[in-house]
Image: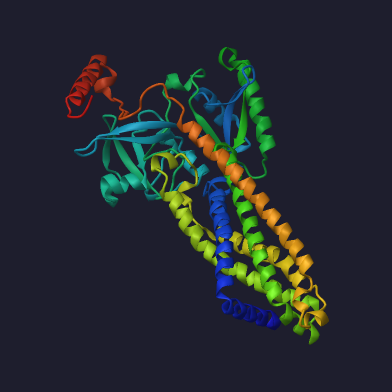
Amino acid sequence: MTTLLKDVRYALRMLWKQPGFTAVALLAVALGVGANTTVFSTVDVLLLRPFSFREPERVLLVWERNQQSGFDRRSVAPANFLDLRAQVTTLEDLSAYRDASFNLSEGERPERVEGSAVSASLFSAVEGRAALGRLFTAEEEQPGRDAVVVISHGLWQRRFGGDPAVVNRQITLDGQSHTVVGVMRERFNFPPNSGDVWKPLSFDAEEARARGKRYLRVLGRLKAGATTEQAAAELQAIGRQLAEQYPDTNTGRDFRPESIITNYTRGPRPFLLVLLGAVGFVLLLACANVANLLLVRGAARQKEIAIRMAMGASRFRLVRQLLTESVVLAVLGGALGVVLAVWGVALCSQGMPQTFTRYIPGWENMGVNPRALLFTLAVAVVTGLVFGLAPALQATRLNFNESLKEGGRTSGAHTRNRLRSLLAVAEVTLSLVLLVGAGLMIRSFVELARVEPGFDPANVVVMDLSLAGDRYDERPEARAEFFRQLVGRLAALPGVE
């Protein structure tokens, strides 16, 4: 350990004496490591750990599968879900959910809010907890007892000023009074597009018998000791039994499980993996650049190395010293790369609109976390070894008697030139791969931007509006009159065509 500390101090002194070389090398390493840390942080959050609850790999989505038509990822009918919940033994906290939206008439400013109707057990499956109040109970899934809601932390702050007295307060959704029983924690977002309001999922008598209307997503957590294969076999058996009991709606249908991580990362996975490969090439380019710099630096230090060998230093000892310098350089560059990564991740996370990122699981956790820091440290050390090994071996492969002579500067020049040529070829090759890939991506983006939508979108504004409540549900003429007045008033606004 004492020898290692001496090597580190010596390496720092050598880097300090050559500020030009150190600055260029640090910049190259920082760019390579920073790009890799940025992309790894994104991949870690969006692909590897998109959900913050425990053991997400044990949480499965359950789909209806139509073997006749070939569709294996269909939503589940309410009656089929109720049968599954009553019969399945390999899954616990079997829950269903669906998207919902509400007209919030609280206060003077009405607002359209997105939300979800969910089973009470859903929160247990994904470890959702309330910051204030409580969550739903199973009894509140019954029609007539479901006029309760849990609101998001954002809605609580935005519409209710963070008032703790919002719990047990009555609010109006779709013209009906509901009781706020709880406020969720700040970063809870499940389902990923859950919005601001969660309401109990309840079925009336007609819905509870419906097998032809499929609009539910179903999930459950594997019980202790159960495997995905066992759950799949049981779900298929239940599906065959229901097909026999209800041939009109369930013939050719059964159920299949899917990992919740696989389902929600299917879209961004190929793009992020391609990006991870691209920044890997950037890191290799940085290694080649720094290795070239170290070769030039090694040639300038040839007499120093020869003197140390003449005084009895072994080749192993000198290689270790040179590798220590390379690793110190890489770790310092990695520290600078972390700063660049923090800036890059923040720029990425803040540059995307919330209306888009709310559909991406894990986006709210974007940041350089401890796993990313460990990754950066590992990458920095490996990078230092990669770009330092060849120059260290080359610098110590010499005849120190010849090197100490006046013309000794030319010793080993042919070998060094060959190694530098190989590094240059590697740089050009990697650069061409990156340039071709970037060119193809830019061309694809340009072509997508040129796709004609079939209409002129210039200055066109779209508004989503839904009428709900007894005032409109049971009076179609009232709905028609509302939209007639709305269109007339909008058309009368200055600048509206």
Q: Quadrant of residue 204?
A: top left
Most extreme residue toward the top is: 248
Q: Quadrant of the C terminus?
A: top left
Most extreme residue toward the front is: 407
Estimate the x, y position of residue 477 in percent, counting from the top left.
23, 14
- Residue 448 visible to the viewer: yes
How many numbered discs, if any? Answer: 0
Estimate the x, y position of residue 43 in percent, counting from the top left.
56, 49
- Residue 371 visible to the viewer: no
- The front one of 47 and 99 is 47
Q: Residue at x 64, y 77 (%)?
A: 11
Q: Quadrant of residue 236?
A: top right
- The front one of 268 and 317 is 317
Does 459 appear above or below 170?
Answer: above
Estimate the x, y position of residue 291 in percent, counting from the top left.
67, 64
Locate residue 388 relative to residue 415 in the image: left or right: left
Locate residue 18 relative to residue 307 in the image: left or right: left
Q: Quadrant of the N terminus?
A: bottom right
Q: Residue at x 79, y 74 (%)?
A: 411
Q: Residue at x 27, y 44 (%)?
A: 159
Does 274 appear above or below 403?
Answer: above
Colour pattern of the rendering: rainbow
- The front one of 150 and 258 is 258
Does 247 appear above or below 343?
Answer: above
- The front one of 59 and 141 is 59
Estimate the x, y position of residue 197 in percent, counting from the top left.
36, 39
